[in-house]
Amino acid sequence: METKLKQATLSGRRSILCVHGRGFKPSPEALMELTSSALRAGLERDFPDSVHVYDSVQCDLVYYGDLSNDLLTSLGGYYDEQLDIGDRKNALKALREIRERKRFGIRQYDRLPGKSALAEFAVAVSVTLLGALGLWMWLCARNSKDFAEYLTGNSDYADRARERVRMKLAGLLADGDQVLLITHGTGSAIAWDAMWELSHDENYSELVDGAKVDLWLTLGTPLGDAKLRKRLLGARQDGISRFPTNVISWQNVAAEDDYTCHDNTVADDFKKMMRERAVSVVNDYMIYNHAVRYGKSNPHSSIGYYIHPRVSKIVAEWLLSDEDVTAVASPNTPE
């Protein structure tokens, strides 16, 4: 294992692994294409000299959409995959047409159709009130049936979803890849649990032999929610055993009005993780997500996150970590 890690490090082999969030999802091929296209479009716009590096790395997706699709359908949900893919493509097309970084600011965001802070405000208030009454899970189930099933369900949904993250991530780490892990929404909680198992569960920790994720990038994560943190694997442990120990750096990006990350910072919530030296750095960034889905502003849209200039900068810095990123940035990239 040590020899493998050294060889991979010397070769500079890198991998990007994406984990999607809750809700109905299109096929893994369609979702991967949209994800990769959005990430690449952001790099083309702001860091064109990083695109050839991006094209050379392995980019993969942990897909458990079949599990969530089956679950949600069994609960009475309806999904039109063809329409969903078409709308995602339209959202990406519109975002690609924004060619100046400064146009991702609040002025343009406030002009989006259907833009409203009411959803985030309502969730924030509801979480506080219902949480005090012990009804946090009831609220979670109303807003996300599949994530509620992950947290408290009696089926094997949680085990199967977590296994998919764990095995793909373990495979990359065991091969000695330098990994950028990008997780969207509730996929961050599943990734946390999988990384905790690879850190502390003796049934899985030997799979990676102490190897670490180079950078964890969370987008619209609910991990800032105190009620959710109590349900994560390791929450009842003491000291460093509470946290995954296989992440070097953690960057968190949260969009204004994204109710999934109504508590939009994680650095303040995971200070103990820093004190225990389970992670080197945790940074928070606030953005405006300009995605429009079905004619209405959707600040939680994964495509809107992937193509955003802040995310592009984080990804480019990781891709070009051995080079001077500011030297290759386009004029659209600020100092």
Image (spheres, rainbow, N blue to C red):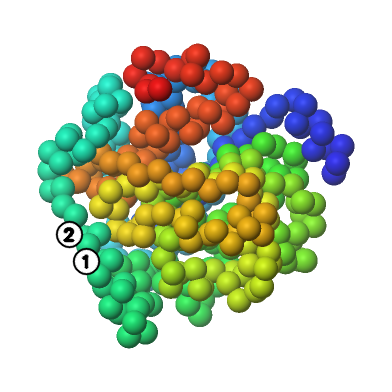
Q: Residue drawn at (72%, 64%), measured in percent from left and top?
A: 200
Q: Residue drawn at (50%, 27%), measured in percent from left and top?
A: 316
Badge 1 density bin: few <14, some 14–19, many ≥20, Cα 10 Å:
few
Q: Is residue 175 left or right of residue 127?
A: right
Picture coordinates of residue 249, whole percent (x, y): 59, 44
Asked whether 213 or 302 is in front, the reply is 213
Picture coordinates of residue 119, whole percent (x, y): 21, 60
334 w.r.t. 223: above or below: above
Q: Residue drawn at (32%, 47%), measured in percent from left and top?
A: 255
Q: Is residue 40 left or right of residue 270?
A: left
Picture coordinates of residue 264, whole percent (x, y): 37, 55
Q: Amino acid at mark 1?
A: Ala
Q: Where, by quadrant of the figure, is residue 242 drawn?
A: bottom right
Q: Residue drawn at (35%, 34%), measured in percent from left and top?
A: 308
Q: Is residue 56 left or right of residue 21?
A: right
Q: Where, by quadrant of the figure, is residue 33 drawn?
A: top left
Picture coordinates of residue 222, whole percent (x, y): 41, 60
Tag of residue 118: 2
Residue furthest right in the image: 3
Residue furthest bottom in the image: 133
